[in-house]
Image (cartoon, rainbow, N blue to C red):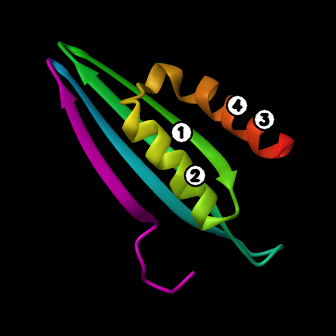
Amino acid sequence: MEPYASSIILTKRRKEGDVRNCFRLVRTFDSFCEADVFSVFLTTESEGACEEDFVYDISRDLGEAKSFFDLLCRNDASAVHLREIAEDFIADCREA
């Protein structure tokens, strides 16, 4: 990871009716393994409510992390369902 580079490498916002989602793909660095770690932060806002969730280490591969990020955005996933979707994604990756 480059010094002084933002940890947030992708952001996408979607609005459907009164529901607004903000998806963020986050990159950090595991200094012990000398590898990038990709995680996802998701905020869902609706009338008077705000839900947030974070999944750490969805992948160590940028392409795979982007696939997960695209899956979330394409399906306009909410923060409430982030962990369930992440568990399914990781299980599918392990089977492949």
Question: Rounded to the nearest whole Å, what is the CA distance between mark 1 and mark 3?
Answer: 18 Å
Amino acid found under the numbered disc labelled 3:
Ala
- Element at badge 3? helix
4 within the magenta span: yes
Question: Where residue 34 is drawn, which disc sits there?
Answer: none
In the rendered structure, are the residues bearing label 4 and label 3 in contact, judged by CB atoms less than 8 Å apart?
A: yes
* Mark 1 lies on residue: 54
- Near mark 2 (Cα within 10 A), the count class, few <14, some 14-19 or many ≥20, is many
Q: Is residue 7 left or right of residue 32?
A: left
Q: CA distance from mark 3 to mark 2?
A: 16 Å
Label 4 and label 3: CA atoms lie apart by 6 Å
Dot 4 or dot 2: first in sequence order is 2
Q: Secondary structure at mark 4?
A: helix
What residue sits 38% from the left and 40% below the top?
73
Cα–Cα span, label 1 and label 2: 7 Å
Callout 3: 10 Å neighbours few (<14), some, many (20+)? few
Quadrant of the snapshot with the N terminus: bottom right
Residue under label 2: 39
Query: Pointer 3: what residue?
Result: 91
The segment highlighted magenta reads 1-17
Q: Cβ–Cβ below 8 Å for labels 1 and 2?
A: yes
Residue at 77% x, 78% y is 34
